[in-house]
Amino acid sequence: MLKQYKLKDYKFRLVIWVTALSILGVMVVGSAQEDLMSKQIIGLILGLVCMVIISLIDYTWIMNFYWIAYLGGVILMALLPVLGREVNGAQRWIVIGGLQFQPSDIVKIILIVFFAKFLSKYEEKLNSPKIILPALVLLAIPWYLIYRQPNLSTSILVVLIFSTMMFVAGLSYKIIGGIIVVAVPAAVLFFSIILQPNQTLLQGYQAGRILAWLKPEEYPELAYQQMNSVIAIGSGQLYGKGLDTNLVSSVKNGNFIAEPQTDFIFAVAGEELGFLGCCIIIILELLIAVECIRIGKKARDLAGTLVCCGMGALIFLQTFINICVTTRILPNTGLPLPFVSAGLTSLVTLFIGIGIVLNIGLQVRKY
């Protein structure tokens, strides 16, 4: 389980990027909602401790329990209707002994580890229906449990991460081409269906968010958050209005956005830190994702490569979606900005994932 590692092989650069972004996140969260700052600091400290501990545990030993982790994640998601706490019409949180956490954040890391082991185990048969179909079924079970919360954004993210890992594992270009040929007209059909007044494909609020994105002037009550987010980011201009601004017209003080400390934290950053602050956040997110991929390229086996690429994809895609939502490029979805948004479950699980990547970096392939 534990091995002797060389300090020079420890990827301190990744640790610096993650820590710097998380500290910036603590400051922005504290500005958005002051009473959450201490909780975010606790999450940062706990996350760093977990990251260091996990980084010293052999990732190949962790992967021996991939089936147990998968079943545990599925059971956890299945318990949501029983133990879940409903917030804003969705059951995404479980409260046990005063501790509240979001199982879908944990499941994202579990699925990355699970499919890294599963796909590497059947690497030679990856393009066979005997492997592709079981993999899709294994994905479909937690995907459905996430989707029914309802949590459309995370269910889409899970599919994108899985697709990235399949591609890196060596999925045939013929299969990829076939998927694209089917996916493009399917997407067109999807949008044409949800634009119908009596459609039943999406739940009311999901369809409403897409319609508000396409036709904000017709759905002002549903579009107001994104519209105000864009205005807030633009109002920050180059240098921003400064952290903890007390202007009544600010996006946080004027209650122009519900829960600005979570999904719309980028709007607060844009208003208070300006264009330069936004660039720093985006660059740090990209550096973390790229560093994960760089470590994955030198991993000693395919499983290590897939974990690193899965984590890189998670951070990049979640950042991309979150920022696209706050800038109204995509419909409104509920995804936090990695290492920046408030939320202990998201922060600590991301640190755990980075810890596994760091251990993979300690066991690079020897040339």
Image (cartoon, helix red, strand yellow):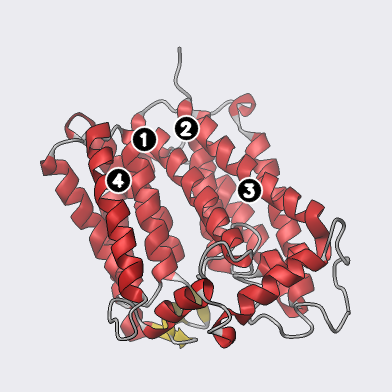
Callout in the foreground (1, 2): 1
- Tell me the distance, in whole angstroms, between the alpha carbons under discs 4 and 1: 17 Å
SS state under label 3: helix
SS state under label 4: helix
- For mark 1, what is the residue? 168
Q: Which picture quadrant has residue 78?
A: bottom left
- Tell me the distance, in whole angstroms, between the alpha carbons under discs 2 and 3: 17 Å
Residue 285 circle label: 3
- Tell me the distance, in whole angstroms, between the alpha carbons under discs 4 and 3: 28 Å
Q: Mark 2 touching mark 3, by CB under 8 A?
A: no
For image coordinates 45% across by 81% down, the residue present is 208
- Tell me the distance, in whole angstroms, between the alpha carbons under discs 4 and 2: 26 Å
- For mark 2, what is the residue? 296
Regarding residue 63, the answer to whether it shows in the image is: no
Indicate whether 125 appears above or below 77. above
SS state under label 2: helix
For image coordinates 29% across by 81% down, the residue present is 199
Callout in the foreground (4, 2): 4
Q: In this view, does 156 lie to the left or right of 362?
A: left
Residue 30 image offset from top left, x and y in percent: 76, 71
Indicate whether 85 appears above or below 366. below
Q: Which of marks 4 and 3 is nearer the N terminus?
A: 4
Q: Which residue lies furthest to the top in this view?
A: 367
- Tell me the distance, in whole angstroms, between the alpha carbons under discs 3 and 1: 21 Å
Q: Which picture quadrant has residue 300?
A: top left
Q: Which amino acid does label 1 sit on?
A: Val
Q: What residue type is labelled 4?
A: Ile
- For mark 4, what is the residue? 180
Callout in the foreground (4, 3): 4
Q: Mark 1 touching mark 2, by CB under 8 A?
A: yes
